[in-house]
Image: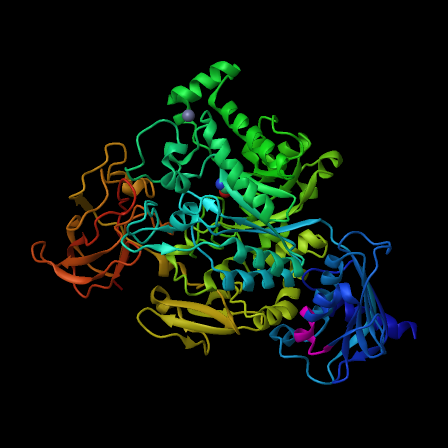
Amino acid sequence: MKSLLTILALLLAAGLRAQPAPRSVSPAAGRFVFGPATTLAADRELLPLARYAAPYLGCRVEERRTADGAVVLLLDPTLDLPAEGYALDIAPERILLRAPSLGGVFNGLQQLFRLLPAEVYACRGLEAGTSVACCRIDDAPRFAYRGMMLDLARTWIDAPALKRYIDLLSYHNINKLHLHLSDDEGWRIEIRSHPELAAVGGFRGGDSPVRPVYGKWDEKYGGYFTQDEMRSLIDYAALRNIEIIPEIDLPGHSRCIASVRPEIRCNYPPDTVSTNGYDYRSAWCVAREENYALLDDILGELCALFPSEYIHVGGDEVETSQWERCPDCRALMRRRGLADAHALEDLFMERVAAILARHGKRPAVWNEAAKSGRLGREARVYGWESVRASLDATAKGYATVVMPGESFYFDMRQSPEEDGHDWAGIFDARKTYGFDPAGCGFTPEQMKHVIGLQGAFFSEAYISHDPERPDYLDYMTFPRICALARIAWSGNDEGWEAYRRELTDAHYDRMAAMGIRFRLFPPRLEVRDAMMHLSTDDGSELWQVADGGAPERYRGPVPAAEAPRMRFFSRRATARSPYVAGRSYYRTIAPEVAITTSMGESRRFPYANAERYRGLSRTTRACRQGDWVLYTFAQPVRCREMFLQTGNRQLPKTIVTTGRVEVSYDGRTFHPAGELRQGSATLHPDRAVRAVRIVSTCDDNGTPYVTIQPPRIKPAL
Ligand code: ACM
Ligand code: ZN
């Protein structure tokens, strides 16, 4: 019997290890079998959770505390378990799930789902005869705060998409959803006492005073949540053990509200000139007393709407130069004896904290707002800039959410050639998984102030993708958020290789059943005997695609001579990997080229910089219809591909928003060669090229200039 139990323990250990992993698993003999008579039994308080679970398990719900042949949910506040902990007892005659809190019951249900076939997530009910091995699981999370932040300001995400995402987070025991509801580019929540904030600030472009820094220019687009819609989302999330924490980013990142209410800014001319963002136009005046009345209206409504104990009030990346020039702010500094403009931010945040306190809430802030230490210790700090930022906040005694961008900003790209930003780093799930606060230098005293971990998806670059397709958000966040959920729930003691196996052997199928279009790790490409060999160990299908052709299944090694035109990738159900290719695929040439434009050349950032400094070469103004950028080559250039880009890679601002491309083979006559997409175009010339020209068909790009990039040219083969 003992050896049978040992084997069972090993089997369970392999099968149970999941996202996240439970603390203690004791296997027992036998199995619980689901059938047509299986019910979900719960008392009144747990009926909503039983109804939540019913479609997954395909069971009827009955109001009872015990029942044979049932999955029994029991809420017992006297249970000696940590908050959100649970005890799951699976016996042949019934499954008993007990927890001291609703969150604990929810976490236990998720663990039960993970023991079942992945199809549980398809919500079609379990096949009759589905069984689960008997065991006893005692579990509780490592961190009370396991969060994810979504930036709705830069890219609007509507209620159905957000509900879907809440479901996906909840399957992973993420319990906080931080919504970045305002920024320079959008205001996404109705304020009933000031309806114009959302009605106007929720839409940019077209005739909106909110100038679109990103992407589209002529078209008005966007959206916002009414308070009723948000209340429904709050309830939807709460049932799934997720607390929504709203953020209104103050006093910086406020250009959108300042576009609707220009008087909140320091006493300077109205915002009629385009800006690249993050400048003097994006902050509130600290000295204007009426601003605090407006903030009281706004924050008061948010405090009433959101049950969360904390309201996030931003505090990051505040431009202070306008305060130094504002007579009122300067007078305030003198009156208060403040040494510098940064002290004004402290003063502003103190006022905001007092407003929140009056409404019964505490402030949550980005780490910059806690740097001086003047903010009260009731505040919660989000350490995004670096690990050091969280070390500093915890040393000062602030409850801190640790989320350094280099491991937790999921808008960063996952390998060099993929989509996404790179300013905080290029990393995949392995780096997120490898993050261990215990190894970051926190003293035991500081560690007591680490309340948890959070991922973030800032969405400036999301707009460069078709917003109708949710796959970019999925691809960027999964499986990195699985790794975050794992380390926040139970740590990373099993090591990367074991964890990766869990992902590929168990969790990939689950994510597919959840409908997540997640990222697979890239297949392995090796060159041996002048052949390219592709392999993978994650059960995915291998594919190859030659430039200009359609993807085909990989049937075996490909001659290395094909490398400059061949890319490979893998697919598995809803998921796909990034492309992999040999080095020669990416090889470019840099023929001598003269760049000229009708938009003038910035003296500070001349075109000569284009080669040396990525993206720091600029025109003197934004584009108007008929404006052009001309690339003239010293010698005719033979190439198989020429990529022309305005703006910075993956950041669709400072681009020629709409335009066409023309190519010349003799330097005099130009021929149409296609339209710009997101400010760029790829040409495949069949002859040597003397010059190419981008011609603007738009009358602005929302910013003060166009960024010029050198052409990226792949040699002819
Ligand atoms: C931030 O990334 N500015 C919080
Ligand atoms: Zn001012």
Task: State the predominant SS element of the stretch in magenta.
Answer: helix
Q: Residue furthest front?
A: 193
Looking at the picture, how far across and down is residue 304, in whole percent? 60, 46
Left or right, residue 499 beside residue 86? left
Q: Which residue is drawn at 62% across and 51% down?
A: 147
Q: Is residue 529 visible?
A: no
Left or right, residue 201 beside residue 457? left
Q: Residue at x 49, y 46 (%)?
A: 425
Left or right, residue 650 beside residue 444? left
Give the total of numbered labels.
0
53 inside magenta stretch: yes
Q: Residue at x 86, y 56 (%)?
A: 79
Instruction: Locate the N terminus and report the quarter of the image it occupies.
Output: bottom right
Instruction: Locate the C terminus and report the quarter of the image it occupies.
Output: bottom left
Q: Residue furthest left?
A: 668
- Name the foreground residue: 86 vs 327: 327
Ligand 2 placement by image quarter:
top left
Q: Residue at x 63, y 76 (%)?
A: 119
Which corner quadrant of the image does residue 612 belong to?
top left
- Name the foreground residue: 664 vs 262: 262
313 inside magenta stretch: no
In the rendered view, tell whether residue 702 sits above or below residue 550. Answer: above
Looking at the picture, how far across and down is residue 32, in whole percent? 80, 78
The segment highlighted magenta reads 52-60
In the rendered view, tell whether residue 76 sits above or below residue 558. Answer: above
- Name the foreground residue: 450 vs 198: 198
Which corner quadrant of the image does residue 356 belong to?
top right
In the rendered view, tell whether residue 134 sits above or below residue 174. Answer: below
Q: Is residue 224 visible?
A: yes
